[in-house]
Amino acid sequence: MSLSKFPLLELPTVALNEVLKLFTPFEIIFFSFCSKRTKSICQSIRLIPKSKEALCTFNVWINSVHAIYLQFTYFQPELWVFNLEKCPEQKYPKRNKFWSVFPQGLLKMCYSRKPTTSSWEKMEKSIEGIHFSNWNPSVDTVHTYSWLTNGTTLTTRHSLHLYTSENLTSVTKKLVDHISEIFHERVNAFGLEWNQYNSKENLMIMDAFCNPVQDFQLTGDTSNDSSKNDVLSSILKNQNAKETMTLWINPSSDFSFDFSQFKNSFEILDITYSHWITFQNISDVRCVKLYLHKSNFLQADFKLLIDKWRDGWTPNWKTMSIELNEDIDVDTCVDGEYIDLEPENYKSRKVVCGNLPIQLNRFKGFFEGNCGAAFMHAYHILRSDGCIATIGIADDKYRVGWFHIR
């Protein structure tokens, strides 16, 4: 077999595009760093309708390492991951070992003749300070969770480990921006394990990744350290999620936050440790679905919310599930005469409205929750203005109260 150089860049445009379709995402990104021309080629190939390959997952996750996750419709179910870590400068004595050597070598292979001096001058400006210990990605299989199916999928993961002696956040942001330019997509999810970093580092991270994202996930246990409350408040205030915010944080018992300071309203706000959530938070938050786990609220508090709604209060959310600190007897959460709905009628608004002046309509049936349909013991409550709220508990989760407003 001949190992002679292949003149890739001397191919006609149509042929070149066909070859590039065979490149993996890593190869496309590497190729784009070779020169300004190769970057332009990689950008343009993604704009051809016939070969446009959607980048459906573009996530940045920052914990002890900085990771960039990519997933494409044409490579599913496969993940392509850059893992960036800090390394001592002496480990890589040659400045910019990867970006100065690898693209030049690849560029040499793309011509049938030796590149001219002007070719080197047209090299795409690289990301300084990134080093690779291995050119070949590691490959393994992982289980990835999907909200849509409420299940896991076995996914092939390709991982490349990058190291830098420069500022890790700055280098990560530059690589993210370059990927964004190549694939014409923005980061759609950002995650941070904030207790891994000090206040200055958290500020730098949030400043670097302050652009709007679909989903934001924050993790970190500081339950025994109230000195970090101000940093946590700053992160929550500056995050820029547009759709889903997941808070896997466990702050100290004296932590509080004004939900009116959130920049945006959410489709979903999911809080794993809700012991710090107040009635005022529930009133202020703007979202469609609110999920509160491990709260300190009691059944009397749940009843108070129901009574408040019956008196005319309308929250800024449509659905709430709340895990109380005790079991719930839903029948004691409502006062007044009720009617038991027939199984075939429990979803009928017409039947509920037709039962006036009786406002309480008790039923047992399936209700759509955050993890699919659950069998509920519940009530439809008709308010004097015609609004209907459904409150209840799932048969297998006696501490979780549901509150849905039609």
Image (cartoon, grey):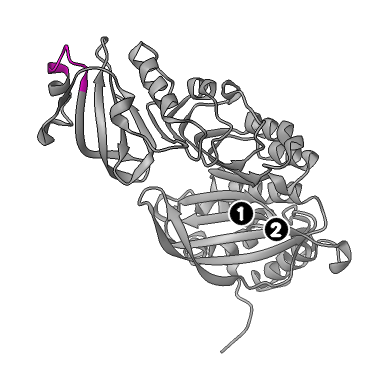
Q: Secondary structure at mark 2?
A: strand
Callout 1, which amino acid?
Answer: Ile
Residue 129 location in percent, x, y?
80, 57
Q: In which image quadrant can residue 94 be found?
A: bottom right
Q: Residue furthest bottom?
A: 1
Which residue is tagged 1? 68
* Left or right of 168 in this view: 68: left
Q: Which residues are magenta?
A: 353-360
Q: In which image quadrant can residue 312 be found?
A: top left
Q: Do callouts 2 and 1 mark residues in contact (Cβ within 8 Å)?
A: yes
- The question of residue 62 being in magenta is answered with no
* Left or right of 384 in this view: 318: right
Q: Nearer the viewer, residue 76 or 290?
A: 290
- The question of residue 358 being in magenta is answered with yes
- The main secondary structure of the magenta stretch is loop
**Along the polypeptide, which appears first: circle 2 or circle 1?**
1
Q: Nearer the viewer, residue 45 or 240?
A: 240
Callout 2, which amino acid?
Answer: Leu
Identified at 55% across, 61% down, the residue is: 80
Q: Considering the image in quadrants, where does the N terminus appear? A: bottom right
Identified at 29% across, 43% down, the residue is: 395
Identified at 10% across, 32% down, the residue is: 342
Q: Considering the image in quadrants, where does the C terminus appear? A: top left
| Label 1 environment density (alpha carbons within 10 Å; few <14, some 14–19, many ≥20) | many
3D distance between C-alphas at marks 2 and 1: 8 Å
390, above or below 292, in the image: above
Which residue is tagged 2? 84
